[in-house]
Amino acid sequence: MEFNVNLQLAGLLEWMDQQMKNCGGKTAVIGISGGKDSSTVAALAVAAYGRENVYGVLMPDGVQPDIDYSNGLVDVLNIPHTTINIHDAVQGVLREMERVGLTPSRQTTVNLPSRVRMATLYAVAQTLPGGIVINTYNLSEDWVGYCTLYGDSAGAFSPLGMYTTEEVIALGRALGLPEKFLVKAPSDGLTGLTDEDNLGFTYHAVNEYIRKGVCDPEIKKQIDAKHKASRFKFETLPVYHNGLTMVLEDETDFYK
């Protein structure tokens, strides 16, 4: 099926409304970076639930040079919001690791802020009436595993999980978001590098591969390798099935 932004918006907003009902929630809690993903999810939530039922959380790690994007987005959408600086929490964990003789690896320092942010979002959500954390990752990032397990990959449901970066931008434009929030280059927030710098290829290349099956052979190898290596991030937690009798039934497949 070809991408039609109006048809997609109608179906997506209906789906989001049903997901919130399934969760028994009321308030959509969203981490706001001011980039295309968080901006589009926040705008979708405003359209689905009303701005009074959307709560934005800005979470700089110390001084964030592009914090104006986050502040600008919550102002444009006119949603309730707060800023919680995660720097002390992140540094506290790292200091305690050093104190007990554990030297944090580079992966630790890269992934810890994302996990602290997600813990913060859940703390906020559990403080608000019917707070539900909404995920903001997209299909392009998902496909190559460019997310942090128990960090930005978490949430109650993912409105953008089946949309490429280019489709996310189209949704944001249809929702009336200012262009600056949609074209801001995503970065890891630590090294100053963009996602594409870290990946070694563009999201456009990923998108063309996903939707059309077209890709440079060398880039295809890289994408396939990253995809295969990252599937564990999106699977249900494995459990050992011990063969013991279980009388109770469950509507999910978790215990099967």
Image (cartoon, rainbow, N blue to C red):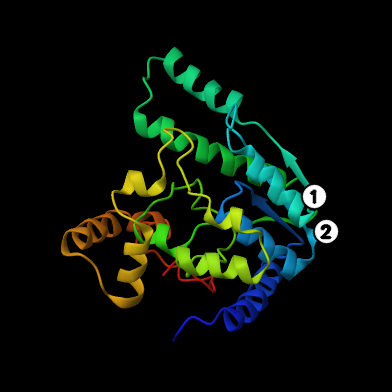
Tell me the quadrant of the picture where the N terminus can be found. bottom left
Q: Residue at x 68, y 62 (%)?
A: 43
Q: Residue at x 62, y 61 (%)?
A: 41
Q: The disc labelled 1 sits on which kind of residue?
A: Pro
Is 33 in front, or is 179? Answer: 179
Q: Quadrant of residue 224?
A: bottom left
Asked whether the residues under the numbered discs 1 and 2 touch, taking CB atoms below 8 Å apart as contact, a structural biologist would say yes
- In the image, is residue 220 above or below residue 5? above
Q: Residue at x 39, y 54 (%)?
A: 233
Q: Earlier in the sequence, mark 1 or mark 2?
A: 2
Residue 35, label in figure: none
Q: Residue at x 46, y 43 (%)?
A: 187
Q: Is residue 237 left or right of residue 223?
A: right
Tell me the quadrant of the picture where the C terminus can be found. bottom left
Asked if residue 65 shows in the view, the reply is: yes
Per the image, the residue denoted by label 2 is: 52
Q: Secondary structure at mark 2?
A: helix
Q: Secondary structure at mark 1?
A: loop
